[in-house]
Amino acid sequence: MDHFSVTATKDISILSELDVSNVKEIKSKEGDVFIKGGIFGKGAFPKYLQQGTSL
């Protein structure tokens, strides 16, 4: 499924070893977003990054 969106009130954790790609938006209104495998693909970048590390 391409270009899906997820919006949550609290934390979001995606624990897959594989990356997340072809996503329109992953958004948490009041929590953190953790993507274990990273993000990949055309136009894939964190729009707002308050705290984080680039590995």
Image (spheres, grey):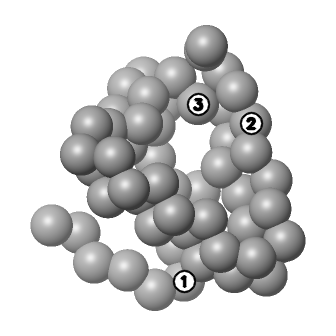
Q: Amino acid at mark 2?
A: Ser
* Residue occupying the point 76% across, 76% down: 10
SS category of the residue bearing label 1? loop
Q: How many marks?
A: 3
Task: Please tell me which of labels 3 and 2 falls first in the chain.
Answer: 2
In the drawing, does residue 36 fall left or right of residue 43?
Answer: left
Residue pointed to by mark 1: 50
Q: Is residue 44 at least partly visible in the picture? A: yes
Q: Nearer the viewer, residue 26 or 51?
A: 26
Which part of the image, by quadrant, shows the C terminus? bottom left
Q: Is residue 38 above or below residue 2?
A: below
Comparing labels 2 and 1, the label whose residue is closer to the camera: 2
SS category of the residue bearing label 2? strand
Task: Please tell me which of labels 3 and 1 falls first in the chain.
Answer: 3
Residue pointed to by mark 2: 5
Outermost residue, left side: 55
Determine which quarter of the picture holds residue 15. Answer: bottom left
Which part of the image, by quadrant, shows the N terminus? top right
Q: Position of residue 48 (x, y in %)?
A: 60, 67
Q: Are marks 3 and 2 in contact (CB under 8 Å)?
A: yes
Residue pointed to by mark 3: 23
